[in-house]
Image: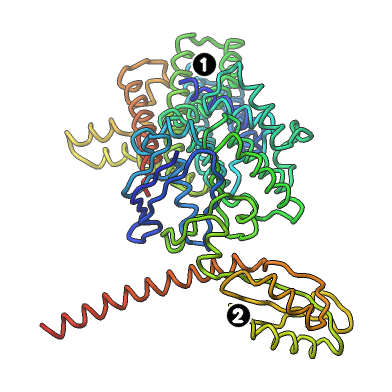
Amino acid sequence: MIEINDLYKYYDHRRAVGPVSVTIERGQVVGLLGLNGAGKTTTLRILACDLLPTSGSVCVSGMNVVEFPDQVKAKVGYLPDVPPVYPEMTVDEYLIFAARLRGVAAGQVKKLVDQAVEQTELGDERSSMIEALSHGYRQRVGIAQAIVHRPEFVVLDEPISGLDPAQIVEMRSLVRSLSGDHTVVVSSHNLPEISETCDRLLVINDGVIVADGTEKELTAKERGMRVELTLRGEGPATSVAERAESLLRGLPLVSEVRMLEPSEPGEGIASLSVASDGDVRDVVCRTLIENNFGLLELSRSERELESAFLELLAGNSSRRAGARSEVASGAEAKEKVS
Amino acid sequence: MTRALIIARREFFAYFRSPLAATVIAAALLIDGIYFYWKGLSEATLSAVALAEFIFVAGGTAFLAGLVLATRLIAEERQTRSITLINTAPIKDSEIVAGKFGAALAMVTLKTLLTAYMPLLLFVNGKVSVGHILVGYAGILLYGAAGTAIGFFGSALARSQVVAIIVGLAISGALVMMWMVAKATDPPINSFLSGLALHHDNFQPFMVGRLELRGVVYYLAVIWFFLVAATKVLEARRWR
């Protein structure tokens, strides 16, 4: 278990993280979601003992990262945003070095390196020089070094950064495959990656955790539901979209209907986005079909989590701005009184 | 200590894959060879004098080679971000320093041993004592180790290898110049300052084959001081 209590990290006088208090249970895949500069990397570096906290406590399996760094390091595998590889080594040499450095007994090294290679599907590249590998394969080598000593916790900082779409899919399944043996903490600003890979999301903004829960919990809490639909009707696409829009606006719980670019070409085909305070998918289907529209496609919006995420950040920023203005107005009032 | 050896082994073999290490060692050996040929084999000189001059030059090249080779050890890892691997491994900063310094020192020793045929050539037409050669080589290694420690400290401080070399040369320059400062001051300050000089009073006994405890202790102290300072710099970076 990872227990973070009232963690703060300052770089000189600038607060990068804090206050952060969170508990991560064993076996979870937890996503740390935030914009660039939100404090993700700093938090993960503290977890990996690469950086020490300014105040607060971070305990991994009950051991504090400041008091027992070596014991904590033995339990954590860390992939930073840039894989810490030596280009002049082969994959095998590098993994053996990483395993030995992390205290794996000489007799166990081969077995564990083989396991890490198999898990990260690096078998064909074992004797390749790391400098000759693509970015995607270097990321795999980075993950292999993080798991080679079979740590309880694997901390991955932006593992899909810079990968092409095919590599992203492979990386997602690789990260998910780690969940059986390890507790995984993965950071990203990429929403689809986080939502498809993690059991639990921690949204971090300005160094503070502003939301904690599953994707469903976060989207339900902030937005209700958003669906996108493609339909076919008689007449030009614009007129079809306008008729459907006015029809759907009248439905209970529907808060917003927007016209989208048609998702496919064709006479009378239109696409709409419907936001609602509850699940209205069945009502929308029935209404459209009863009014002689052909429903070609209906799906929950991919931007749903994105919207929730942006609202969380906006809400947090406005709350902070509000708090700041309250403080400012309080100070102003004090000045006036004096 | 085992993990220090693991690091030392990796760094040592990394030097053999680095064009910088090959260039530095080749250049140092070339300078040693040319100087030895010019002073030791071409001119009519006493063998002991030729040997002393060879030790002077080989000491200088070992010092500079050690300094340059050591500057890559931390600065380059920081630049390529591979330093995170050792920072997040269960290994003490002192072990990191010991392992990396050990690898650079092994390269300096290798470079020094590759010059061994030069003083042996003096036996062909001249006469030198084996003791003079051994003491001279001890001096070369101690002086080279001091340069390596200073370069390593520069590497711990700087983000780039070029800056680390500049820092290392500035520290070395200041320490070498101590004997000049000593000359310009009055007793008892002058003897204290000349005792701090990196080369002059501390290295000259080795050149003439005289093993003095003072010089040995001085170079060991320099090595210890800069390695401890480098360890402290590495420790401090985690708090930033």
Q: Is residue A276 above or below residue B9?
A: below
- The quadrant of the image that shows the N terminus of chain B is top left
Quarter of the figure with residue A52 = top left
- Name the residue that disc number 1 marks: B47
The residue marked by circle 1 belongs to what chain? B
**Is residue A25 found left or right of B235 in the rendered image?**
right
- How many numbered discs? 2
A195 sits left or right of B150 in the view? right
Say which residue appears at 54% left-offset and 39% top-offset.
Answer: A27
Mark 1–mark 2 Cα distance, whole angstroms, equals: 106 Å
x, y percent for residue A23: 42, 46
**Considering depth in this image, is A280 or A61 the residue closer to the camera?**
A280
Please name the residue shown 61% across and 79% down the image.
Answer: A254
In percent of the image, x 62 and y 68: which residue is there? A304
Pointer 1: residues within 10 angstroms few (<14), some, or many (20+)?
some
| Extreme residue toward the right, this view | A267
Q: Residue at x 25, y 81 (%)?
A: A329
Q: Are marks 1 and 2 on the same chain?
A: no
Query: For the residue marked with disc 2, what is the amino acid?
Result: Pro
Percent across and percent down for residue A126 are 74, 32
Q: Residue furthest left?
A: A338
Disc 1, SS: helix
Q: How is the image coloured?
A: rainbow
Going by the numbered disc 1, the residue's amino acid type is Ser
Task: Tell me the number on the disc at residue A252.
Answer: 2
Does residue B176 appear in the picture of this structure? no
Looking at the image, do the residues carrying marks 1 and 2 touch, with CB atoms under 8 Å apart?
Answer: no
Quadrant location of residue A193? bottom right
Task: Tell me: A67 left or right of A184.
Answer: left
* Between B194 and A246, the one nearer to me in the picture: A246
